[in-house]
């Protein structure tokens, strides 16, 4: 989706009233916060944006006065703005690389904020569940399987008569951490993807049967209105859009349907532990009940801020999100951080000045 044809701009704002006893309805009467007027400005990933929006609303009820503007423009653009020092914090589903971090004079702290799952949402006539093996969904996105009645798909779904309908994959047109996490998974599970696929990245060249859209919400909207389509999208957004989601084969050979608790179960099952630099990828999680496509998502903060008051505000907001804010994650289909990971993230914030 071209941004101009289907625009999306999340403006997540926080206005904390200092007048004791002002009722909650007073929040709605406040002037709109902009990047020019906010005390803190952040930008980046659309994947966790609904949760960040909730954090900002809830923090407004629990904190004293400062304002936050968050622009959900995608992970790639968020990293670019952060590296150019145009924001106070960034957000990305693809953790910054060492060479990117080295280019930020102020230093960088990667703070895991939550984790979530990437669903394969689809639009087919009729009803019924859909199961896709690792090999099959990889070959769909490689353009090797082009019709829904392909024998390989039908064999996985004997109780459902699949239509003779061309498969259209819906992908991201912008530089996206969701794309990075999805292609990193495909690269881990598919020999074909590793050998002949378009690689791993925030933005790649998809096969000709693909239609691209901007942001997770754009992918969800295009799937909803495009019969025969399938696309990768953050689970909570797919759920709120009313989309059907496939059960996917995991590393153990079991099929797992995405759910509100899938990310939490997967993180609990994995034997991989968060390293000291807080940059952990889980492209092919172990565990029989694990959903196969899960990713952490990060907030990006500077190690040093020119304004100590700005550093204090960033730390206060993130500390709240890493503690009280975690309880809101399941409502949106995200996974609260495991306690050891949250503790490491809070420790990392202590170094911010």
Image: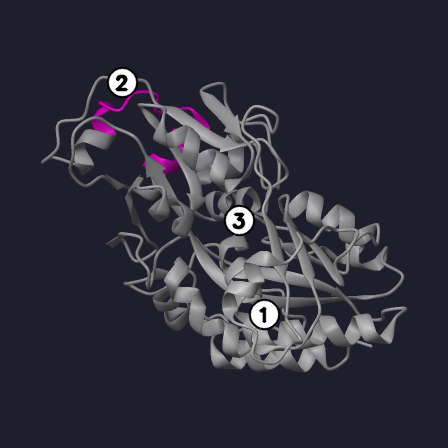
Closest to the observer, 142 or 117? 117
Image coords of residue 184 (percent x, y): 53, 47
User: Which quarter shows the C terminus?
Assistant: bottom right
User: Which quarter shows the N terminus?
Assistant: top right
Q: Is residue 145 magenta?
A: yes
Please say whether residue 276 is visible from this viewpoint.
Answer: no
Left or right placement of residue 289 versus residue 180 in this view: left
Give the magenta part as a residue range.
136-152
Closest to the observer, 180 or 222? 222
Mark 1 vs 2, N-terminal side: 1
Q: In which quarter of the image is residue 180?
A: top right
What residue is shown at x 30% (from left), y 56% (from top)? 259
Q: Does the magenta stretch include residue 149?
A: yes
- According to the image, label 3 marks what residue? 181
Determine which of the numbered discs, if any, sits on residue 165 in the image. Answer: 2
**In the image, residue 168 above or below residue 232:** above
What residue is shown at x 50% (from left), y 23% (from top)? 207
Label 1 with label 2: CB-CB less than 8 Å: no
Q: How far apart are marks 2 and 3 (CA)?
A: 28 Å
Please say whether residue 310 is visible from this viewpoint.
Answer: yes
Mark 2 vs 3, N-terminal side: 2
**In the image, residue 233 above or below residue 315:** above
Q: Distance between the residues labelled 3 and 1?
A: 32 Å
Determine which of the numbered discs, if any, sits on residue 60 in the image. Answer: 1
Sort mark 2 into few (<14), some (14-19) or many (20+) by Cα contacts within 10 Å. Answer: some
Left or right placement of residue 182 versus residue 44 in this view: left
What residue is shown at x 18% (from left), y 30% (from top)? 154
Label 2 with label 3: CB-CB less than 8 Å: no
**In the image, residue 293 above or below residue 351:** above
Sort mark 3 into few (<14), some (14-19) or many (20+) by Cα contacts within 10 Å. Answer: many
What residue is shown at x 59% (from left), y 57% (from top)? 29
- Say which element carries label 1: helix
């Amino acid at each position: 989706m071209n941004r101009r044809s289907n625009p999306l701009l999340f403006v997540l704002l926080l206005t904390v009233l200092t007048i004791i006893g002002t009722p909650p309805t007073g929040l709605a009467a406040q002037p709109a916060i902009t990047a020019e007027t906010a005390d803190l400005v952040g930008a980046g990933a659309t994947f966790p944006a609904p949760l960040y929006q909730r954090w900002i609303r809830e923090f407004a009820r629990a904190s004293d006065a400062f304002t936050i503007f968050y622009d959900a423009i995608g992970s790639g653009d968020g990293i670019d703005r952060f590296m150019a020092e145009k924001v106070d914090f960034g957000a990305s589903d693809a953790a910054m690389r060492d060479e990117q971090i080295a280019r930020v004079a102020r230093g960088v702290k990667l703070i895991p904020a939550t984790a979530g799952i990437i669903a394969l949402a689809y639009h087919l006539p009729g009803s019924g569940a859909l199961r896709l093996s690792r090999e099959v969904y990889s070959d769909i996105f490689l353009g090797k399987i082009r019709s829904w009645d392909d024998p390989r798909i039908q064999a996985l779904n004997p109780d459902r008569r699949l239509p003779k309908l061309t498969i259209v994959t819906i992908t991201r047109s912008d530089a996206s951490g969701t794309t990075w996490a999805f292609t990193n998974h495909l690269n881990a599970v598919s020999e074909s993807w590793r050998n002949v696929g378009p690689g791993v990245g925030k933005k790649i060249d998809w096969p000709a049967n693909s239609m691209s859209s901007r942001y997770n919400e754009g992918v969800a909207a295009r799937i909803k209105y495009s019969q025969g389509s399938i696309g990768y999208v953050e689970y909570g957004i797919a759920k709120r859009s009313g989309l059907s989601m496939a059960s996917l084969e995991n590393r153990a050979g079991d099929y797992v349907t995405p759910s509100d608790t899938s990310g939490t179960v997967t993180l609990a099952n994995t034997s991989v532990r968060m390293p000291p630099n807080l940059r952990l990828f889980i492209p092919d999680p172990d565990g029989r009940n694990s959903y196969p496509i899960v990713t952490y998502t990060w907030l990006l903060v500077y190690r040093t801020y020119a304004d100590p008051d700005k550093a204090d505000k960033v730390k206060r907001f993130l500390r709240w999100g890493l503690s009280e804010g975690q309880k809101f994650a399941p409502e949106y289909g995200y996974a609260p951080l495991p306690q050891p990971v949250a503790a490491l993230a809070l420790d990392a914030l202590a170094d911010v000045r």
